[in-house]
Amino acid sequence: MALAEMPVSGVLLEKGGYRARLAQGADDVMAARLLRARCFATGALDQDQFDAGCLHVLIECRSSGALVGCFRLMLLESGAELSQSYSFQYYELSRLASFPGRMLELGRFCIDPGVQDADVLRLAWGAVTSMVDRQGVALLFGCSSFAGTTPESYVEAFALLQHRHLAPPRQRPGIKAAEARSFSDLLRGRAEGQKPDLKQAQAQLPPLLRSYLAMGGWVSDHVVIDAALNTCHVFTGLEVTDIPATRKRLLRGVAEQH
């Protein structure tokens, strides 16, 4: 698919000590795969059939060129193309099939474990915002991963997601993967009406998912256990029209600093 208004240089934006740019060839994609392998700690190079159909975004240190983060993007014209996406393998997405607008799948989001600079995440969201605006995207989606394959470790996070952040019924993904656990099952045994511990829940949420939720994102009502990637994940969606105006201004402020 032809992508509109892509920068010839591949650089999407620069902020502080970092820059975000599109991968320019096989060496760049390999660098992203190697970082993904380190972050997911699977002991093998992380690559799959979806890499070829995606744009790969690299986040680098401007002074050294060191790769500190990466993610990949797949643009779909509408919900009718969801079967091409990575997420389609794991979630029953028939309720999103009639979505009329452009969609962007954000996947394999990784930040080097040795880098503890919040500017990396801000730059990543600025780069995503740039792509969303350039391509007229109406819905952003993907799989938000929790480390490890033991969802019981994140019960407060799942309690919060069930309490506040489930997808609207008209869009809610169904269970498809064999290794899936519903939030209701994971929370069985809690006292009726017991509210999530907000401090614990926030600590258990991955940074990417916290960002989605802060912008009005929603999730599936179940978690998928992905042993191959040593993660468990929830389907996450965000309609661009639901992002609060103040948050849009902040994101576009980052995206325009190039």
Image: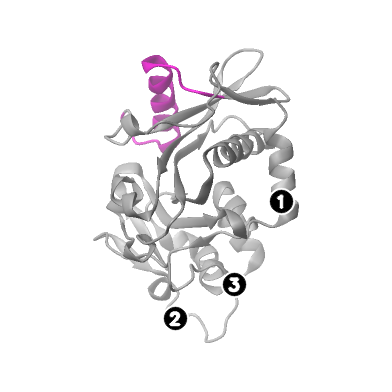
Kindly identify which residue carries mark 3: 196
Residue tagged 1: 247
Say what amino acid the circle numbered 3 marks. Answer: Pro
Residue in view at x 34 percent, y 42 percent = 229
Front residue (pair 143, 39): 143
Please report the residue visible at 41 percent of the width from the left and 71 percent of the height from the top: 186
Please identify the quarter of the rendering in which residue 189 is found. Answer: bottom left
One can see residue 147 in this view: yes
Number of residues whose C-alpha sits closer than 10 Å to that of mark 1, classed few (under 14), some (14–19) or many (20 or more): few
Rendered-image quadrant of the N terminus: top left
Q: Main secondary structure of the magenta part?
A: helix
Q: Position of residue 122 (x, y in %)?
A: 66, 38
Per the rendering, the mark at residue 189 is 2
Which badge, 3 or 2, is on the more N-terminal residue?
Answer: 2
* Residue 124 part of the magenta segment: no
Circle 1 or circle 2, nearest the eye: 1
Tell me the CA gap for discs 1 and 2: 37 Å
Mark 1 vs 2, N-terminal side: 2
Q: Secondary structure at mark 1?
A: helix
Q: How is the image coloured?
A: one colour
Q: Where 38 sits versus 89, above or below?
A: above
> Which range is magenta?
21-44
Residue type at tag 1: Arg
Q: CA distance from mark 3 to mark 1?
A: 25 Å
Mark 3 or mark 1, whichever is nearer to me? 1
Q: What amino acid does circle 2 point to?
A: Gly
